[in-house]
Each structure stands twice: as C-alpha cells, then as structure tokens.
Image: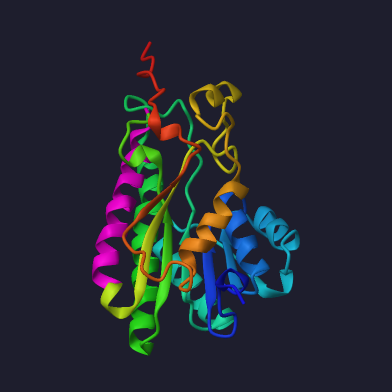
Amino acid sequence: MSLFDTPFDPAREAALVTGAGNGIGRAIAQALVGEGVRTIFADVNADTVTAAVKSSPRPDLASTWVGDLANSAARDALLAHAEAAVGRVTHFVHSASPPRREADHAMAVSTETWAQMHAVNLEAGFHLARALARKLIAAKVGGSFLLLTSLHAGTPRNLPHYSTAKAGLAMLVRELAKTFGRYGIRVNALVPGAIAAGGFVADPKLARHIPLGRLGAAEDLAPMALAVLSNKVSAYVTGAAIVVDGGLSLTNWFEPPELE
C-alpha cells in the first residue's frame, strides 16, 4: 500500500482550520474530512461555514465554530470547543484573515483596520498555535501546523496592514518550528499566489504575469496543504515556506498606489 493512500491516521489525528468558511481554508478543511480526519471548521460567518460543512465529502466528521478571532475570549472559546468536539487537535491550519480593500493603502488605512488585520492573522495564529502545542507537548504527541502567509510577506502590496501581518506570520512559522521541533511538532507556511477565492478578487488580466497562464483556485492549494500537514508524507519538513503560485513570484507586477 502506498503512503499516499493513507496520509493521515484518523483514529489518532484531528484538525482545526480557521477561515474554513470560504476560499483556501474551506478547501483545506473539506479535503481533511475527505481523508477521514475529524475537523473543526472555524469561521467568523455562520452561513458560509455551515455551507462549507454541508458541501464537504464527510459532513459527519466536521464540527462548526463561529466567532471573531480578533477577540482573545473568542480564541479561548474556540480552543474549548475543539477539545470538547474532537479531543486533542494534532493538525492546525490558520487561514483566517479579514477582507482587504485596495483603498486601504498606507495613507488611508484606519487604526481599526490595521489592528483587526494583525489580530486575526498574527495574534490569533500565535496564541492558538501555542495553546495547541502545549497540549501536544504535555501528552508527548507530535503534530503539524500550517499557517497561511503570502507572497507579500516579502514584497510590498500597497496594503501595509496586510503585508506586515503576513510577514509577521512568516517569521512566526520559523520561530515556532525551531521551538516545537524537539517535541515532534512541525510548523510550516503555505504561501499562495493569486488565488481567486476568499477575500481576493483577482483581475483576470493578472494571468498574463503568471508563467502557468492562469489564476489559481483554492483547490490548487488543498493537495499541497494535505501533503505538508501529513506526518507520513512530510515527516522531515519544518520551518519551510511552500509556495503555490503558478510562478507568479518570478515577477513583481504592482505599481505604487495613487494618492490623489
């Protein structure tokens, strides 16, 4: 039997996916239950996350949670829900991120928008990952965490609240990978390109900058996410940033924002 036939151990593994109501988070969460992994679908929108579960291959393996991860109390509530619903979480995917507007450039972004972007991406990512790792370390059980960053962790995006939050996440992945590695917990980043899903509305003209000739879809990310999350397929991979962008990062297509 090929290891690709059974990349996960459903009897001992369970997952928590934030941002599971749409886009990349939804695709990864649905792929996990499709592999038999009990999974918490967490999102800020009740309608979208309910629809994501209903359209998944195994709704019986999914549990929904709704709340705003910018709030520390909500993060604690999510952790409590996850423990009650699936027990020990071994696989954590942090895909939640607020919507981003092209109008929110450096001279226009509000203090509230800045804070919300950092809270949901960076602060929630850190506090959830640390809390889940503490449980795994205490139980002497390994795990695998995957944080969604961005090509703009290293390239300006004209959205400083977004790019700096993702840059922080990129370093957080490396910090946590170094700290947790001795306990058998792997931490990696998934780096999407122009994915027409979730909070990103892509201009079809962008495809001309992509060597593979098309915009990406959330479903392009899910197989790689599963491979990196799997402790059978990627047992010796940690602290890595896995780019899935059709080659987009080979170019830089953004112009400075118009300030007038």
Is 104 part of what is drawn in magenta?
no
What residue sits 38% from the left and 60% below the top?
188
Between residues 204 and 259, which one lies in front from this camera angle?
Answer: 204
Quadrant hosting residue 253? top left
Q: Residue furthest front?
A: 1
Residue 250 falls left or right of residue 47 = left
Q: Main secondary structure of the magenta part?
A: helix
- Where the N terminus falls, by quadrant? bottom right
Measured as percent of width and height from the top left, residue 50 is found at 70, 60
What residue sits 58% from the left and 43% below the top?
198
Measured as percent of width and height from the top left, residue 123 is found at 34, 57
Q: Residue furthest top?
A: 260
Does residue 111 show up? no
Is 166 part of what is drawn in magenta?
yes
| In this view, 219 is above or below 181 | above
- Where the C terminus falls, by quadrant? top left
Measured as percent of width and height from the top left, residue 45 is found at 61, 54
Measured as percent of width and height from the top left, residue 246 is found at 50, 37
> Which span is picked out in magenta?
158-180
Q: How is the image coloured?
A: rainbow
Q: Residue furthest bottom?
A: 139
Quadrant hosting residue 71? bottom left
| In this view, 61 is above or below 159 | below
Instruction: Tell me how many marks there are.
Output: 0
Does residue 22 show up? yes
What residue sits 39% from the left and 27% below the top?
251
What residue sits 75% from the left and 58% below the top?
55
